[in-house]
Amino acid sequence: MRKFFSIMVLICSAASFSGTAYAQSRHVILISIDGFRPAMYLDKNWPTPNLQILMKQGTYVDHNLSVFPAYTHPAHAAMITGSMPARSKITYNQPVNDRSGNWNWYYKQIKVPTIFEALKKAGMTTAAVMWPNTVDGDINWNVSEIWDKDHPSDRATVVRQHARPIGIYEELEQNATGKLDSTSQNDELFTLDENTGRMAAYIFKKYKPNLMALHFACVDGAEHEYGLNADSVRLAVAANDRAIGGILQAIQQSGLKDSTTILITGDHGFSDYHQVMRPNRLIKNVPATFIAAGGSCFLYRYSNTKSTDEASIIKAVTDSLNYLPKDIRSLFRIVDRKELDKMGADSSALLALTAVPGTVFSGSTGAAQTVNHGPGTLIQQLQYEGLIVPSTGGHHGYDPNIPEMWTGFIAAGAGIKKGGHIPEMRVVDISPLIAKLLNIDFKTPDSRFPQDIIIK
């Protein structure tokens, strides 16, 4: 059971941030709120006073498009590379062929240049606090997100081991957070995000990196467990807004307000769901398997099959899917390889399924559930029994173009239009924006610079 505690929302410095002179940016703070949705700042009923003030002071978007699947690690890799998953090779949260429980934690797993590298070449400094995909990266101050796969709630023990430079974690404990362990740095507690904010504020005030990227995880966790609009989600959002207020105060205290830009983004939206579909139950005699990613799943041929077999595999699977009764077939659409290429999805997948909101996928091939219809009742094993299993919660991973998967974006501070508004951007467009703000060259083949955000 997730543990909660009272949240006092901090508005300490957002109002004064409006006095920022819109000069050339020398410092960018990129804040990712996992599971961030546009309603959390567009709807004043959400407990986000800092975000709503920043929205008015800067430029905001109606919606920000994720990648496919709309998942945490692929989206965060897209933010710092300007590349879609097919190019970055961060296609899911976990490596496709790794069933050991490891995630895409390490910087070396990203197969394209990052904005961190570009800034280093330009003689600038960088920092990352709990940012995905950056463990052991060449980043000046790096406290990256990682955990022991056997103790996934513990976000302190392994993080401490990989923090760089050596001693930075202990310095943060002494000056910003107090002693950290698996109790205080636990993904079931909002203190995880509060301490992330304190770490980031301290690093910015003391070391003044040109780019600092930080990631808040708790909103996503609450949405997964309780759905979109539960009180627990609102508490998590309020905790993040408070932490952002602390970072805004750090900008003021650093004396760098006039040359600092703050970018607040999400990685994906969310959908409530009420059932799980298990498509691998349909393809028992085909040398391929579906790998589930929440609201989507991707088909891969077995490694011992030939590429020449792909056409027959695709036909067999597609036929079995199209043969389903209309009420089941209407729960998803088939995404062929041509469309996957346009979406920048994993190039090794043969096809994908993307569900309608309310349904998610599982790779399970478990037996059908047995239902007791009463004493003496004959239980008949139906053809599709066990294909659809009731379940509840919140999830993502769907087609990023559907409204439920839209995430948010707000920019304010140096170089940003005041009172600006654009209808749409993409997470993959964030790194060219950072490059433009910091006046460096960074080639991003899958992205485009969002012109209407900065002052021309």
Image (cartoon, grey):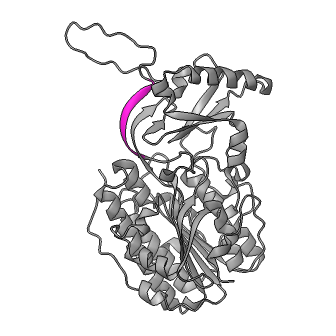
Q: Main secondary structure of the magenta part?
A: strand
Give percent across and percent down for residue 2. Answer: 31, 54
Q: Residue at x 65, y 85 (%)?
A: 26
Give percent across and percent down for residue 197. Answer: 45, 73
Q: Residue at x 38, y 72 (%)?
A: 48
* Res 260 → quadrant: bottom right
Residue 245 belongs to magenta span: no
Give percent across and percent down for residue 205. Answer: 52, 85
Determine if residue 154 is in view: no
Q: Is residue 427 left or right of residue 309?
A: left
Q: Residue at x 75, y 77 (%)?
A: 440
Residue 388 belongs to magenta span: yes
* Res 300 → quadrant: top right
Q: Is residue 286 left or right of residue 4?
A: right
Q: Residue at x 68, y 26 (%)?
A: 302
* Residue stretch rendered in magenta on the structure: 387-394
Q: Residue furthest left?
A: 375
* 55 shown above or below 45: below
Task: Name the foreground residue: 308 vs 93.
Answer: 308
* Res 453 → quadrant: bottom right
Q: Is residue 110 left or right of residue 234?
A: right
